[in-house]
Amino acid sequence: MSTVVALIIRNIKLFFKDKGMFFTSLITPAILLVLYVTFLGNIYRNSFNESLPEGLNLSKNIIEGLVGGQLISSILAVSCVTVAFCSNFLMVQDKAKGCIKDLKISPVKSAILSMSYYTATLISTLIVCFVATVICLMYVAIVGWYMTVADVFFLLLDMLLLVLFGTALSSIINFFLSTQGQISAVGTIISAGYGFICGAYMPISSFGDGLQKVVSFLPGTYGTSLIRNHAMQGAFAEMQREGIPAQVIEEIKDSLDCNLYFFQNQVKIPVMYIILGITIIVLIALYIFMNTLRKKI
């Protein structure tokens, strides 16, 4: 056990000491926060106002609460996965620099080495993402806070699950990488592409029917929806208290992917948790199997 702990601490220290990996992991939440607040805030505000039937108006505070919830849910949904990939690049760097050879000729078992990479990536990603969460919640508190304690708790739970998902997915993909060039290529693809396919940059409801059906098979989509539901639930509840018809609220939820549909059937929040949980278990099992198979070969 002491060997596992020592390796985990070693990997975490290396991640935070490596300015390249650390600052790369912070780029996504930082850029998204500036991008969304500076350029997309007004678009979201106008979209919410236009979605209301004629004669119905929302207070400025609720509009800001809705915009804030949508902004932070998009940022956190992407960061939980992209930061996990950046954190896990240490495993690839050890291969590229030859450090992995030194570790393998030591008495350390392959399973312990793999576990240390996974756990260190998980802890490093959680640290970065929780810091980003604090910043995002401070932003929401400034513009319009409607979240309850339960909403914050479930938001953190959603992030934990997405980080577990991102860590398992990155462990499997990085398993096949061994050079700095491959790190750069995969990092660019994940940073640029994941936000689109999970519905963080653009709502899935704005995609074509065919693409919506394809994306509905991706577990990250449901992780984004979970975060968005809990980030905006308080604002939706306040809308209902102000007399906004339930049908209008549901239409807004549909447009923001708070309500997701799998071939026209709405996927409830408990089912989203089940999908994400099963995916995490399957990915971790696959990662263990891959390392076991490599050891036998």
Image: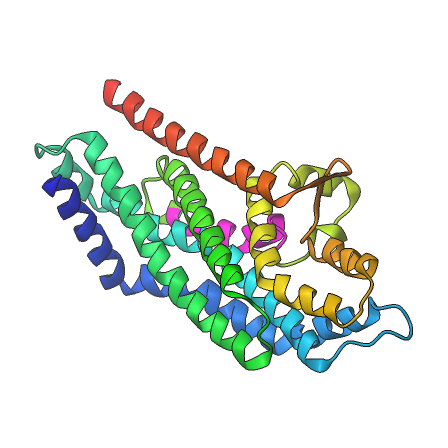
> Between residues 53 and 151, which one lies in front from this camera angle?
151
Q: Residue at x 60, y 38 (%)?
A: 271
Quarter of the figure that contains the N terminus: top left
Residue 55: horizontal and vertical position, in percent? 90, 75
- Among all residues in the image, which is located at the extreme top? 296
At a point 35% along the width and 36% down the height, the residue shown is: 175
Left or right of 128, for residue 9: left
Q: Please, what is the dominant secondary structure of the magenta stretch?
A: helix
Work out whether 88 lies above or below 100. below
Q: Residue 229: give x, y in percent of width and height.
A: 61, 56
Question: Could you tell me if residue 193 is visible in this image?
Answer: no
Which quadrant does the C terminus fall into?
top left
For the residue pair 218 and 103, the one nearer the viewer reads as: 218
Q: Is residue 118 visible?
A: yes
Indicate yes or no whether the magenta region holds residue 181.
Answer: no
Looking at the image, the residue that sits furthest to the left is 107
Q: At 53% from the left edge and 77% from the top edge, which residue is drawn?
A: 141
Vertical position of residue 158 compared to residue 236: above or below: above
* In the image: residue 31, left or right of residue 258: left
- The span picked out in magenta is 183-200
Give me the residue at 16% from left, 41% from top: 4
Residue 184: say if magenta.
yes
Residue 105 x %, y %: 10, 32
Residue 187 at x, y percent in the picture: 44, 52
